[in-house]
Image (cartoon, rainbow, N blue to C red):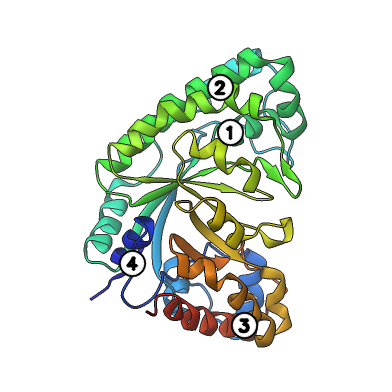
Amino acid sequence: METVHSRYAKVLAGERPDDRLPLFEVVWWDQTIRRWESEGLPQGMDEAQTKTYFGLDVDHHLTFGQFGPGAPPWPAHGQPFIRNEAEYEALLPHLYPDPPPFDPAEWGRHQRAQDEGRAIVWFNLNGFFWWPRVLLGIENHLLAFYDQPALMHRINRDQVCYLRRCIGALCAVARPIMMSFWEDLSYNHGPMLSRAMFDEFLAPYYRLIMPELEARGIVPLLDSDGQIEPIIPWFEGVGIRGCGPLERMAGVDVNQIRRNHPAWIMQGGFDKLVMPRGEGAMRAEFERILPAMRAGRFFPSVDHQTPPGVSLANYRIYRRLQDEYAALAVRK
């Protein structure tokens, strides 16, 4: 009999579950939950309770914080914490907390849920494009590839050390099945850096951290919005094995990815913009992605967080269709 854990493990390995594909969704926007609560969703549920309520698979995922006690408040979106190496030095006492900030007892309990097949355990790490951007701000980060290359390398060397500590600490109490790097380096027309910049500033650090994951049997994935298809070979070359959320509004085509990258794991792919248009539009969207679902290594889900323009009634329709097509995809 299949379990939550066995289905995920089979899809990650390129195998077909006996009954259905996993029912995976990322967390919802706060505005979406508030709307649904006004439309009848029970109030005050946590993420696991909400997923159970909707009949989704429960996944326990941990995002490691990078800031310790006394860190300055977050600036406005896209604005910098630091502008140069001296400011990075000043901020360092508040970065890379040791031990990493999580509750080992809590994640031991989540591991027991995975052992019993009721859930999976996975985690997120800030990637080697994402983390310097957090520190430097969006504009300054892009300029820093040219203006402050030594600082960029120093940040990512420090990041490798911190990520090793995070992986070791979590894996002392749990056995995550997969993980994902936050790494928004694409926009609607493609990547925000060149292949040469990727090879110089990101690839060496991915190659340093991959052995930590491979030794523990953790499947490494990537989270990047936008048009991700052109950079799949870049990440394949450093050991990443899949990505999400595969945004349709950025022109991403999961069927094309499957043809061009047969072993690439995919998550997402369902166009969230069709959801307010009702059952016919949602069924047509599932029909569009069904070939990729049948081809394997695919966790079909909303291609990012479900937006607040989707009513609770329409989300229930989506969930019913997701159940239907998750079973249809494995039917022999």
User: Mark 3: few, some, or many residues within 10 Å (few <14, many ≥20)?
Assistant: some
Could you tell which of marks 2 and 4 lies nearer the N-terminus? 4
Residue drawn at 52 percent across, 50 percent down:
261
For residue 126, above or below residue 291: above
Q: Closer to the camera: disc 4 or disc 1? A: 4
Could you tell which of marks 2 and 3 lies nearer the N-terminus? 2
Separation of marks 3 and 1 at Cα, in angstroms: 38 Å
Closer to the camera, 224 or 296?
Answer: 296
For residue 197, above or below residue 13: above
Disc 3 element: helix
Could you tell which of marks 4 and 3 lies nearer the N-terminus? 4
Disc 4 element: helix
Q: Residue furthest front?
A: 259
Residue, disc 1:
131
Separation of marks 1 and 2 at Cα, in angstroms: 8 Å
For residue 111, above or below residue 321: above
The quarter holding residue 29 reads bottom right
Residue, disc 4:
7
Residue, disc 2:
155
Residue drawn at 26 percent across, 52 percent down:
108
Residue 98 drawn at (x, y percent): 38, 29
Disc 1 element: helix
Could you tell which of marks 1 and 2 lies nearer the N-terminus? 1
Residue drawn at 32 percent across, 38 percent down:
214
- Disc marking residue 149: none
Residue, disc 3:
283
